[in-house]
Amino acid sequence: MILTIAARELRGLFLSPLAWTLLAVVQGLLAWIFLILVGDFRNLQGRLALLDNAPGVTDLVAAPLFRVAAWVLLLLTPLLTMRLLSEERRTGTLDLLLSAPVGSTAIVLGKYLGVVLFLSGLIVLVALMPLTLAAGAPLDSGKLLAGVLGLILLAGSFTAAGLYLSALTIQPALAAMATFGLLLLLWVVDMAGAGQKALGSLFAYLSLSRHYDALLLGLFDSADVAYYLLFIAAFLGLTIRRLDDARLRD
């Protein structure tokens, strides 16, 4: 049942003009940035040849591209998740779904998986851009894979948060704004603890960007992966609890 719901959500996304428009705009923007980064790298090659342990194409092209892609996901995901549950609540189709012999867990995981698969396709297209440079420049496959893993974990975390906030309201626009606000807060929360030892370490751990930056540097730490997995599990659990409460009220 989870795969059936995921396939339904994925099919709905690919049939939506909004999803195709967002996909085209995102790919066009990232391709333009990629070409700029490649041009800058070519202009710096003469200077880099004089340096010991000079950064390579992975550090100067792939990592900045993935960093921009993370910001794009931050903007894009709320638009994709805002209708997942709020639109169904507004139209009444969620009541029909809850009355069917389908568990809340299957509903949540199916909808979540559908959006994550869509975003994973976008991430694959982004990852193919630096891979085109492999014929003419050495790529650090470890850093590249760590960056792709970081993007997938970010997409999963953003989607989980957006799905939960979509379950709290019947207004998709409100869900989108709340999701973006929450994600942006968690992205820059480490700045609030700058200069404070106790709070600084706490806010740094809560920051979505801090864990992602570590992966971009090729520093694979199980603690960073665990953070994202716990983040995803927490918001999916809250969403399931929300649907269970709605089912009991009905």
Image: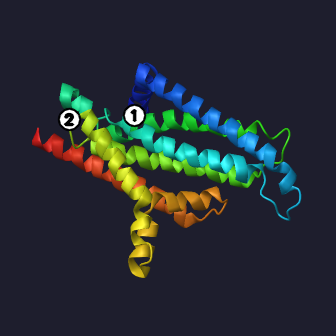
Left or right of residue 211: residue 58: right
Q: Is residue 1 left or right of residue 172?
A: right
| Residue 80: numbered disc | 1
Q: Which residue is mark 2?
A: 170
Question: Which of these two is toward me, 174 or 47?
Answer: 47
> Dot 1 surroundings within 10 Å: few (below 14), some, or many (20 or more)?
many
- Which quadrant holds residue 12? top left
Residue drawn at (80%, 45%), measured in percent from left and top?
A: 43
Most distant residue in the left direction: 249
Residue 48's place in the image compared with 156, above or below, is below
What type is the residue that disc 2 sits on?
Answer: Ile
State the separation of the CA atoms marked 1 and 2.
15 Å
Query: Are the residues flagged by discs 1 and 2 in contact, CB closer than 8 Å?
Result: no
Quadrant into which the C terminus falls: top left
Q: Position of residue 227 (x, y in %)?
A: 47, 62
Image: 21 above or below 198 = above
Q: Residue at x 17, y 42 (%)?
A: 246
Q: Nearer the viewer, residue 66 or 3?
A: 66
**Percent from the top left, x then y, of residue 248?**
13, 44
Label 2 neighbour load within 10 Å: few <14, some 14-19, many 20+: some
Residue 99's label in the rendered image is none
Task: Left or right? Give the position of 84 relative to 124.
Answer: left
Q: Residue at x 43, y 41 (%)?
A: 75
SS at badge 2: loop
